Image (spheres, rainbow, N blue to C red):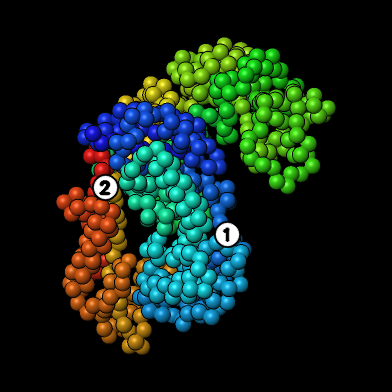
């Protein structure tokens, strides 16, 4: 009998599942804390908790990891040289000090605007080759003609031997600068991803696991390990994608909204007819707009580890996270007694001055600490200390902002009351020390004249309302949050109704189902194995390949020129089109595909070619991923652009081919 192994390294936990290939049943699962900055130890711990008897029969391993996302967010990627080709505006803010802009690029028809200045490219490459580990290149309108990017790639690779990533290889969307950022981030990730994948392959081999290995992409599809090495940028946000795909599989629902309540955050997304709903603008990561196709999601800082703190009589939730008191009591001997006897410092209360707040060192090594940071840091060790402990040790009031700075630098970690503690008090989730959680609820509830149960019930109710708000904000884009909150509070005798099922994932997610039903009229579903749904999602992702083909009608004027178009434009301005039509001399149809640019004189011939190349590119990819033709379904959508009342052939025709298949040895949904 054969089995498959799915692993998801999330923000707080790393989940692992073993699934029987014959019927897709989860036969075993495990959880371990995610490890930073290297997720591999956490993955090892999760695998160690599985029955080793299954491991020899595993034929497929699929992984979802936060590695790419964290690397970008923490700016720990390898140095990259960025080459921008063309006459476009270079913003003041760039992600690297090593960049150059050179002449070259094409127009919207894929014709050369200026000759590529290859000498400037080579001079730059030789100048920075010892300072960077890779290069990235983006050329103006390379999505219409990539020849300048390919010329740069060939020259730089021959000169330096470094890997180089082209913008057109990652996106066919408009936006030369956004493609440059996408290529840059991808180049940054290649060495790190290569090291991680080699390490995990070695780990599997040491355990006797000889299996096909896949990774989940941020659009919910899976990709072979070779492509993951070339395009690691596509694995950003694979965690939310895993939860989405896993929820659909576990609930057997092709169309549903999904709420994943994790330790760090709550993510909301949607499946429609078996496919994830994608963002129209591409993923934004670390403040950088990319052209990576990713699921559309609503993310908030409300999670099981969100810090619950008081200011006056107001209960605040997050946005910072903390180690729950119930877990800290298990991690640090004697912590529960320390918590019981802790006293809050009189004076201004903020997030870092709380009767239930403690601080402990992480494993990160301090670099370039300021004097104030160094003074506080040396009094925080491997055992938790409170604000009061620091006050006594320093003989003065510690600066809350300096504590905040040390937390941001990940040098210290906070311990505090969280929604996980509230669920422990209420008996709805009892993984760790209930007594420590109850003590925290007592200390925080006392100034509000609430007992531990009442305080915890109020925390749970507010967390549920935050989750409900995230769901409605996702489904009704643009609706102001304060308006959503008014309805959720029952103002004006109104209530939201959601017509599709809503699937809840995450260890404690089921605890919020009843509260959510009271807030929103919807079918909330908590499937079996909801606590490890992300790991299931890493395993059941479909093979998906999207190919876009554009057919552009070109009117060549008497001057022999076509109207110019800037790359950020989707289509020519209407007056430019009309002017071109009035001066029409000849009509051509240019087909742009990821493989080539081709010109036709007859529209029907251009469409016939586009249909052929679209199907061929999808099928070639799927066969290369190990799929048979019979396992692949190809859906085609067409979108035509034409002025109102237009009766001639469309000015633009966009064909989108989506191939859907299940990789061999993967599960049948």
Gap in Å between the C-alphas at discs 1 and 2? Answer: 35 Å
| Residue 599 image point, x, y percent | 27, 77
Q: Secondary structure at mark 2?
A: loop
Classify residue 628 as left or right of residue 310. Answer: left
Nearest the viewer among 117 and 498 is: 117
Q: Is residue 647 visible?
A: no
Identity of the residue drawn at 70% across and 35% down: 403
Nearest the viewer among 571 and 643 is: 571
The image shows residue 499, relative to residue 643, as above or below, that is above
Dot 1 or dot 2: first in sequence order is 1
Identity of the residue drawn at 70% across and 25% down: 385
Identity of the residue drawn at 40% across and 65% down: 168
| Residue 213 image point, x, y percent | 35, 46
Q: Secondary structure at mark 1?
A: loop
| Residue 529 image point, x, y percent | 34, 27
Circle count: 2
The residue furthest bottom is 559
The image shows residue 532, relative to residue 171, as above or below, that is above
| Residue 276 image point, x, y percent | 32, 45
Q: Disc 2 designates what residue?
A: 663
Q: Disc 1 designates what residue?
A: 79
């Amino acid at each position: 009998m054969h089995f498959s192994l799915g692993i998801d390294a999330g923000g707080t936990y790393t989940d692992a599942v073993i699934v029987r290939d014959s019927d897709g049943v989860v036969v075993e699962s495990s959880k371990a804390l995610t490890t930073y900055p290297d997720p591999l130890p956490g993955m090892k711990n999760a695998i160690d908790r599985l029955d080793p008897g299954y491991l020899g029969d595993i034929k497929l391993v699929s992984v979802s990891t936060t590695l790419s996302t964290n690397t970008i967010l923490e700016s720990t990627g390898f140095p990259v040289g960025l080459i921008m080709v063309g006459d476009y505006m270079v913003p003041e803010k760039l992600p690297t000090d090593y960049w150059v802009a050179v002449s070259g690029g094409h127009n919207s028809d894929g014709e050369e605007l200026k000759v590529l200045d290859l000498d400037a490219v080579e001079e730059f490459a030789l100048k920075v080759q010892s300072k960077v580990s890779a290069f990235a290149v983006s050329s103006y309108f390379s999505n219409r003609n990539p020849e300048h990017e390919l010329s740069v790639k060939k020259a730089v690779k021959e000169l330096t031997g470094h890997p180089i990533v082209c913008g057109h290889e990652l996106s066919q969307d408009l936006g030369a600068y956004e493609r440059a950022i996408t290529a840059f981030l991808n180049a940054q990730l290649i060495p790190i991803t290569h090291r991680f994948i080699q390490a995990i392959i070695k780990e599997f081999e040491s355990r006797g696991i000889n299996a096909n290995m896949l990774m989940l992409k941020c659009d919910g599809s899976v990709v072979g390990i070779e492509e993951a090495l070339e395009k690691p940028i596509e694995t950003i946000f694979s965690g939310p994608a895993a939860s989405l795909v896993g929820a659909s599989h576990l609930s057997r629902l092709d169309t549903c909204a999904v709420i994943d309540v994790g330790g760090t955050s709550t993510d909301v997304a949607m499946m429609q007819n078996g496919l994830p709903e994608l963002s129209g603008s591409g993923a934004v990561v670390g403040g950088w707009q990319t052209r990576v196709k990713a699921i559309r999601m609503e993310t908030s800082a409300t999670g099981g580890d969100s810090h619950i703190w008081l200011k006056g009589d107001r209960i605040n939730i997050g946005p910072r996270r903390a180690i729950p008191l119930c877990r800290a009591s298990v991690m640090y001997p004697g912590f529960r007694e320390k918590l019981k006897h802790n006293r809050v410092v009189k004076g201004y209360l903020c997030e870092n001055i709380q009767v239930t707040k403690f601080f402990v060192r992480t494993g990160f090594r301090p670099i370039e600490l300021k004097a104030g940071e160094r003074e506080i840091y040396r009094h925080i060790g491997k055992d938790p200390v409170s604000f009061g402990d620091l006050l006594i040790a320093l003989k003065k009031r510690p600066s809350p902002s300096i504590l905040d700075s040390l937390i941001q630098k990940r040098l210290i970690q906070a311990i505090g009351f969280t929604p996980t503690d509230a669920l422990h008090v209420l008996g709805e989730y009892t993984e760790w020390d209930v007594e420590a959680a109850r003590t925290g609820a007592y200390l925080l509830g006392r100034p509000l004249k609430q007992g531990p149960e009442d305080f915890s019930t109020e925390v749970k109710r507010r967390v549920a309302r935050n989750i409900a708000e995230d769901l409605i904000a996702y489904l009704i884009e643009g609706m102001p949050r304060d308006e959503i909150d008014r309805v959720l509070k029952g103002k004006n005798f109104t209530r939201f109704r959601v017509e599709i099922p809503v699937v809840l994932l995450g260890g404690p997610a089921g605890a919020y189902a009843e509260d959510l039903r009271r807030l929103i009229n919807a079918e909330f579903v908590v499937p079996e194995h909801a606590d490890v749904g992300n790991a299931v999602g890493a395993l059941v992702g479909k093979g998906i390949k999207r190919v876009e083909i554009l057919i552009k009608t070109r009117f060549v004027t008497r001057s022999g020129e076509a109207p110019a178009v800037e790359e950020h434009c989707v289509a020519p301005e209407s007056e430019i089109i009309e002017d071109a039509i009035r001066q029409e001399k000849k009509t051509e149809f240019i087909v742009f595909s990821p493989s080539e640019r081709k010109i036709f004189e007859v529209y029907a011939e251009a469409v016939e070619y586009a249909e052929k190349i679209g199907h061929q590119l999808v099928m070639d990819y799927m066969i290369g991923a190990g799929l048979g033709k019979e396992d692949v379904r190809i859906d085609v959508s067409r979108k035509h652009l034409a002025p109102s009342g237009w009766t001639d052939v469309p000015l633009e025709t966009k064909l989108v081919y989506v191939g859907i298949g299940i990789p061999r040895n993967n599960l049948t949904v």
